[in-house]
Image (tube, grey):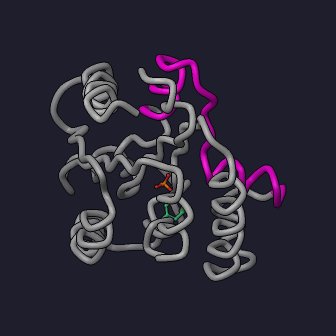
Amino acid sequence: MSAGFMDKNIVLIGFMATGKTTVGRRLASRLGLQFVDTDMEIEKVTGKTVAEMFYKYGMIRFRSEESLVIKKLSARAGLVIATGGGAVLDPENVKALKQNGVLIRLTASPEIIFQRVKNKRTRPLLNNTEDLQELINRMMAEREEAYRSVADFTVDTGAGTRYQVVENIISYLRERMF
Ligand code: S3P
């Protein structure tokens, strides 16, 4: 990697359960960079889980904590940042993240997302629904443009191994000479 590489953050974006945290951790360790996850930062700052934040204080409060965390992290460099699935729905967050970051979008089909989340209770937006697959289909369709329009590079995590996903991202970064 070129010397300029550490001047940038590598930011993983995309829908819930596309693998941002897992891939981000591995990518950071491969590149010798620090890994941060915005949901985990919010939990650290507030002392509450993401689900508790949503249920006790509501989504608006969660989004405002998320924006604060993003502002702080965007002022740093040389980080691999895994964002929450809703982070780039706010143009202010996108602006901050893009300032010194390259935005890598992770994708997977709605069916694969369903398989990954069906037995988990950690995502408040996907709880309390009769038809989880239908909700996932609808939310993904609604958000598609928001993710697509801001991504510098997109990787499908549904096909291939986590290792291949990480190598794919590294090849892209090398080509771009970050
Ligand atoms: C959200 C995604 C979650 C978390 C919160 C809201 C969203 O993060 O930030 O539950 O709006 O898509 P993950 O994408 O890591 O599940």
Q: Position of residue 131 (x, y in %)?
A: 28, 70
> From the viewer's perspective, is residue 4 above or below residue 115?
above
Q: Splitting the image into 4 quarters, where does residue 33 fall?
A: top right
- As for residue 28 lying within the magenta part, the answer is yes
Q: Splitting the image into 4 quarters, where does residue 93 fall?
A: bottom right
- As for residue 52 lying within the magenta part, the answer is no
Question: What secondary structure characterizes most of the magenta part?
Answer: helix
Labels in figure, total = 0
Residue 54 left/right relative to 96: right
Residue 33 left/right relative to 19: right
Residue 138 or 91: which is nearer the viewer? 91
Give the residues in magenta.
23-47
Give the residue displayed 46% in from the left and 33% down from the top: 22
Residue 24 left/right relative to 35: left
Give the residue displayed 42% in from the left and 47% down from the top: 102
Instruction: State the quadrant of the N terminus.
Output: top left
Residue 134 or 146: which is nearer the viewer? 146
Q: Position of residue 91 (x, y in %)?
A: 47, 76
Give the residue displayed 36% in from the left and 58% down from the top: 15
Instruction: State the quadrant of the C terminus.
Output: top left
Give the residue displayed 35% in from the left and 46% down from the top: 104
Q: Position of residue 84 (x, y in %)?
A: 51, 57
Most extreme residue toward the front, as rendered? 3
Residue 176 left/right relative to 17: left
Q: Position of residue 7 (x, y in %)?
A: 56, 38
